[in-house]
């Protein structure tokens, strides 16, 4: 997918370029900076000495030496003071300048750490939001695969309030399903109870659910029972007045994958890919279910992934990157292809 959050050691990323959260001297330091210098070898320090340092918010490029990456893009993030001293503009510049260098050197893939979120003290949730916004703006006009690399779960933060809200939403849906399961078990035993819980209508689990027919598929004269996933997707893109490129970029889908879907009327996508298109098209929940059925899938309250998707759709938040941040935080598969 064009933009992906991954848990890895950035020095092991086999990409065209990795980004180093450097200090102004470019001569190495702690954290990511020190790890990159150690992994690249002493030749990196020799080249960096010839660069004459780097200003905050700017970026410079060197060879990758012993790293799997061909290039290292060095950028100097801001030290966080109070959030009112131009930190956000400087941090945004780190990403935009690094991406511009990657493009100038014909890089097709680049991996970033979360800049300034370590020793420089930038609040992680705010640093992540700036990173995602800047990267996605770049990707809307450019073809490149960009990775946000975090070393462990502790280094990633979507914000305590959002995390708690999603966690409560998940727990509430699980609780409703398991309450029905318990009730069925008391009446008819374990096997029959699970069968009932699996086939009970969603309205039984969620008070504000609406029937699928309400203002939905059966009122739409263009609804075709024999449509394939590909046919329905292309029809909905046209109905939304979107171009193909607008849709697959918004869905975080690679152009080559979209071409396969367009050219093969019987193409069966993965569930994350199908949902990604539903999010890009900003479909309500019933239409999302409709599109998923064409790919052989359905949303269920039996797993966190589906409940998180439902949460964002019901909130009217169709930012696929915000959804992927939440999915990553809850250790779920990401949307895209």
Image (cartoon, rainbow, N blue to C red):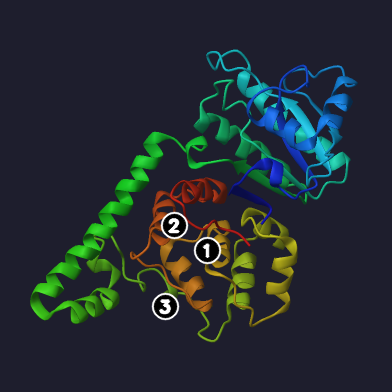
Residue 155, image x and y in percent?
A: 52, 35
| 3D distance between C-alphas at marks 2 and 1 | 8 Å
Left or right? Give the position of 209 relative to 220.
left
Q: Quadrant of residue 245?
A: bottom right
In percent of width and height, residue 99 lies at 77, 38
Is 11 on the left or on the right of 40, as rendered? Answer: left
Measure the C-alpha gap from mark 1 to mark 3.
Answer: 21 Å
**Image height of 77 relative to 273, above or below:** above
Q: Which residue is mark 3?
A: 218
Up the image or down, 284 lies above or below 326; here it is: below
The structure residue drawn at horizontal position 58% and vertical position 57%, both measured from the top left corner, is 280
Secondary structure state at the residue bearing disc 3: helix
Q: Which residue is painted at 39% across and 35% down in the image?
A: 160
Kindly state the secondary structure of the residue where label 1 is placed. Answer: helix
> Mark 1 or 3, which is nearer the eye?
1
Residue at 42%, 63% in the rendered image:
285
Please identify, in this view, whether the residue under mark 3 or under mark 2 is nearer the observer: 2
Give the residue number, with chain letter if any, for mark 2. Answer: 309
- Residue where numbered disc 1 is placed: 275
Q: Residues within 10 Å of mark 1 (few under 14, many from 20)?
A: many
Q: Is residue 290 left or right of residue 30?
A: left
């Amino acid at each position: 997918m064009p933009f992906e959050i991954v848990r890895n050691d950035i020095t092991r990323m086999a990409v065209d370029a990795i980004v180093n959260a450097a200090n102004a001297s470019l001569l190495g330091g702690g954290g990511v900076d020190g790890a990159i210098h150690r992994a690249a070898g002493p030749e990196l320090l020799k080249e960096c000495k010839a660069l004459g340092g780097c200003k905050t918010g700017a970026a410079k490029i060197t060879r990758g030496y012993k790293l799997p990456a061909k290039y290292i893009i060095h950028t100097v993030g801001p030290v966080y003071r109070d959030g009112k001293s131009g930190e956000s503009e400087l941090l945004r510049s780190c990403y935009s300048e690094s991406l511009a260098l990657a493009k100038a050197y014909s890089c097709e893939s680049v991996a970033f750490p979360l800049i300034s979120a370590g020793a420089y003290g930038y609040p992680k949730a705010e640093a992540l939001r700036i990173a995602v916004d800047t990267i996605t703006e770049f990707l809307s006009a450019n073809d490149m695969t960009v990775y946000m690399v975090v070393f462990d779960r502790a280094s990633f933060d979507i914000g305590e309030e959002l995390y708690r809200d999603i966690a409560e939403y998940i727990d509430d849906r699980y609780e409703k399903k398991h309450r029905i399961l318990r009730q069925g078990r008391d009446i008819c035993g374990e096997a029959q109870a699970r069968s009932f819980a699996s086939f009970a209508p969603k309205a039984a689990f969620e008070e504000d659910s609406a029937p699928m027919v309400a203002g939905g598929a059966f009122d739409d004269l263009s609804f075709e029972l024999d449509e394939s996933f590909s046919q329905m997707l292309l029809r909905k893109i046209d109905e939304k007045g979107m171009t193909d490129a607008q849709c697959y970029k918004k869905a975080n889908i690679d152009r080559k994958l979209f071409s396969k879907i367009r050219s093969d009327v019987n193409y069966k996508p993965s569930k994350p890919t199908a949902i990604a298109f539903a999010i890009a098209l900003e479909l309500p929940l019933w239409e999302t279910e409709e599109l998923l059925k064409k790919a052989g899938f359905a949303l269920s309250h039996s797993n966190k992934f589906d409940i998180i998707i439902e949460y964002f759709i019901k909130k009217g938040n169709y930012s696929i990157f915000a959804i992927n941040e939440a999915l990553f935080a809850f250790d779920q598969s990401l949307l895209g292809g």
